[in-house]
Image (tube, grey):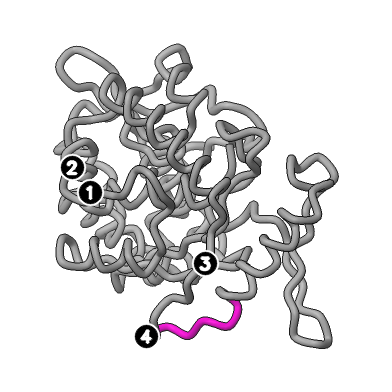
Amino acid sequence: MFEEAQYFAPIATQDDGSVVVELAASHPGFADPVYRARRNAIAGLAVNHRRGTPIPVAEYTEQEHEVWALVTRELAVKHRAYATAEYLAGAERLGLPRARIPQLQEVSELLEPLTGFRYLPAAGLVPLRDFYGVLADGYFHSTQYIRHHSVPFYTPEPDVVHEVIGHANALAHDRYAALYRLAGEAARRVEGEEALEFISKVFWFTLEFGVMREGGELRAYGAGILSSYGEIEEFRGMDIRPLDVAAMGTTHYDITKYQDVLFAADSLRHLEDVVGGFWATCDDDSIAKLVADAS
């Protein structure tokens, strides 16, 4: 229900150097001064971080750890029913803590020996080219805050549940991690903004909201589905279309509701051949041709 690297609450740096997260009036934490102060403090950690240095520790409250534990427990049940075998293997391999929110530095230290990926803290919006480009170097931008405790199974923006449960478990599997890197290499290769947006849409319909046929069932591998308590129950009833790069790169989607159009791979090998092959070879000219052919 959100687009990676684009739909974060805006942040502003004050004259005194403090950081303020501008939550919308509809945000569950808007009227909670304690939550807003926590969001500001956590955003400040990311603003001041420099790549290559340890990620600052976010001091989570017991209430925030309880939200993580509750969501982790419930999602684990749904993952067994709906997630692809490779995603489940990645989750088993990574071994995230279930009773407390892991620090991003801790996630990096678990992940790097497996696939070479490390996490970078994000305070808010990360420009598309930066967000996707660093994937080529094995970095993944991630928020550190967690959703408001009043609605533990909902977030209007990507939080640490989405970034870690959704993405890190996939990044712990070699074949998925390779696809993330290919997306990053493609984002660095293209020069035009339209080509970059096309690449980001293909990422959206695959590594965020991708589904795959496995053992006669439709299962999910996309982080957006696998981190959403509600959407994971609904994806099989959506408009499921064949995997098609041109269609994915030109299809409009609405971030404010469950995704009603999904593209299914026949297998992980099929995903690698079609989407991985596209990311490995695409350039501005080839993407422009795909757009023209789709129109």
Give coordinates of residue 189: x percent, y percent: 37, 70
Against 106, residue 212 (above or below) is above
Q: Residue furthest front?
A: 62
153 and 125: which is toward the camera: 153
The residue tagged 1 is 95
Query: Which quadrant of the view contains residue 21?
Result: bottom right
Helix, strand or loop at disc 2? helix
**Crowd band around label 4 with a 10 angstrom C-alpha radius: few (<14), some (14–19), many (20+):** few
Residue 122 pos. (x, y %): 54, 67
Q: Is residue 48 magenta?
A: yes
Specify which label sits upstream in the sequence, 4 or 3.
4
Give, as a three-letter code, the residue at label 4. Answer: Gly
Residue in the picture at 61% in, 40% down: 155
Q: Which residue is mark 4?
A: 52
Mark 1: amino acid:
Gly
Nearer to us: label 3 or label 2: 3
Q: Nearer the viewer, mark 4 or mark 3?
A: 3
Q: Are marks 4 and 2 in contact (CB under 8 Å)?
A: no
To which residue does mark 3 refer?
Answer: 58
CB within 8 Å, label 3 to label 1: no
The residue under label 2 is 92
Closer to the camera in the image, 115 or 134? 115
Task: Compute the Cα span from label 3 to label 2.
Answer: 25 Å
Q: CA distance from mark 4 to mark 3?
A: 18 Å
Q: What residue range appears in magenta?
A: 47-53
Kindly indicate whether the residue at mark 2 contacts the one at mark 1 (C-beta within 8 angstroms).
yes
Q: Is residue 37 above or below residue 99?
A: below
Q: As shown in the figure, which amino acid type bears the numbered disc 2?
A: Glu
Q: Secondary structure at mark 1?
A: loop
